[in-house]
Image (cartoon, helix red, strand yellow):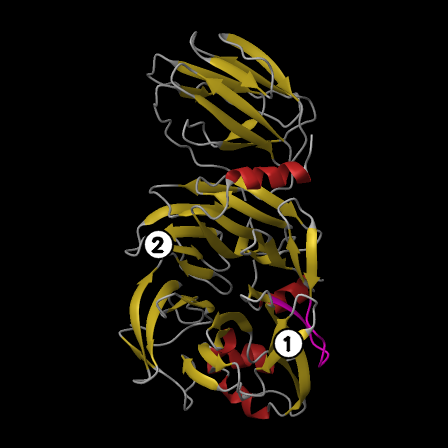
Amino acid sequence: MSTEQMQKLYMPCRNRPFLTFAKRVVVALGLVVAVMSLTSCGSGTSSPQSTVTTTSTRTLKITTSTQFSPTFDPTISDYVVTPSSDAPIQITITAPADTQVSVDGSPFHTQTFTTPVSISPGQSFSIVVRSPESSQTYYVRCLPTDFPTWTTERPGTPQAEYFVITPNIPISKGTPGHYVIVADSYGVPVWWYRSSDEPHDALLLPDGNIAWNLTNNAEEHKLNGALVRSMTVENVSGGGFDFHELRQLPNGDIIIIADVPRGPVDLSAYGGSTTGVVVDNVIEEIAPDNSLVWHWSAMDHIPVSETDPQWRQQNIQQLIPADPYHMNSVEPNGDGFIVSFRHLDSVIRVDKASGNIVWKLGGTHRTESLTFHGDPYGNFGGQHDARVLTDGTLTVHDNGTEQGRPPRAVRYSIDTTARTAVRMEQVGDPSVTGSDCCGSARKGSGGDWVVSWGLSPVVTELTPTGARVFRMTFNQGYASYRAEPVPFGVLSRTTLRAGMDAQFPR
């Protein structure tokens, strides 16, 4: 796919990022490690060394010949090393007399010793530390040379244990990335998979597999990397695959979006051609055998006249084919679906049985429209990721595109009798002042928000008052289309490590 085609697809859902870890204070728990400067997953070029000192009289010192992240903390179990050459990593241990250390399965030693470790990208080794008080195992994995990089800040305690991210979208000119990543709440990539195509919208499935959208299809994989199934749209109308959404229903069916060209359509009332072609967004429910179960067409239920005026010049007058709807999320909701349309600046609820629109929030007015209450803006600007919480409230990542304001994560109480949407809360990140496209906003059961700020290199977890407890900032000009939080207790580190070891055996 050309750069021009990618830009049209994102339109804006453009893009991508990755990994340098922020310094952390070393916790004194009787055993404290001073990590000295580092260099490579299997390579011999050494860098100048410096020592992080502590005031503890019982200090274990570790010196390595390659970059090691994050800074060692006895409470952090997983680390990564960054490759710089092919020679073995030299690991030097200086241990107190009452502490024994084993590196990569070698015999336990005390005092000072050096052990070489040879691993390739993706592979790992362990460091086992035994003291009179305890025994602890730490896991170190080697990163690929093309792995995206980011910095991490952790000023509070995140409520998410992991974050599923795809930092692949170039924010400016650049080459799309290829990684699906599960990072922990210290910003450490504990699991990843490298695809031959550009993954988007990765999500953890209830059975522990991970699925994601690619350019022309969606894939489900086991944590060991094995492909479970490939899913694509049913071309009942000559449609193509749309990467913007992937959801799984309780019965195992998958919800995806098809882009179907339709025309000729008279678009002259909006400054377009009298014989124009329109991209119709079609929701498709696909069974595990890839058969089509149900579908719903935006164009059959929403006239082009509902395209918000701010989008008409760019997406009707100039874009061929025209993109008046730009569906970007489909959320299962009881007997229907909550659907977000970027170019309508609105979110709607569809009744599955009849296909009728039950209500509409934002955008141009129609009979089913709800009225905003308590919202300072009273509209959306190219919003994404409309979701429904267990209490029935609606959450939205409101990009604020073309509205002269920063993006926000916002939540509403919907009253279909009074025909109102009452704003309950909203949060923003002061460092993010604009969001042309993309993004997600997920509110957890503990109240915190995890937000990917949309065509921005920033993912944050914020408290309900907007206080930042966690932040990833992707380097190299990349963004993650969404960031899906994984609550504590859903995924085990042992399972994630086993999946990686199966992908990259030693």
Label 1 crowd bin: few (<14), some (14–19), many (20+), radius 10 Å: few
Quadrant containing the C terminus is: top right
Horizontal relation, residue 46 to residue 86: left or right: left
Residue where numbered disc 2 is placed: 448
> Could you tell me residue 499's position as x and y percent?
62, 41
Numbered range of the magenta stretch: 232-243
Q: Earlier in the sequence, mark 1 or mark 2?
A: 1
Measured as percent of width and height from the top left, residue 396 is found at 41, 67
Residue beneath disc 1: 293
Q: Secondary structure at mark 2?
A: loop
Locate the N terminus by quadrant: bottom right
- Residue 346: image quadrant is bottom left
Figure check: 337 above or below 80:
below
- Please name the residue shown 53% across and 85% down the image: 355
Residue that appears at 37% across and 70% down:
392
Residue 345 in the image, given as x and y percentages of width and height: 45, 76
Q: Secondary structure at mark 1?
A: strand
| Viewer-side residue, 158 vs 10 | 158
Q: Looking at the picture, does residue 13 appear above or below residue 447?
A: below
x 47%, y 41%: residue: 187
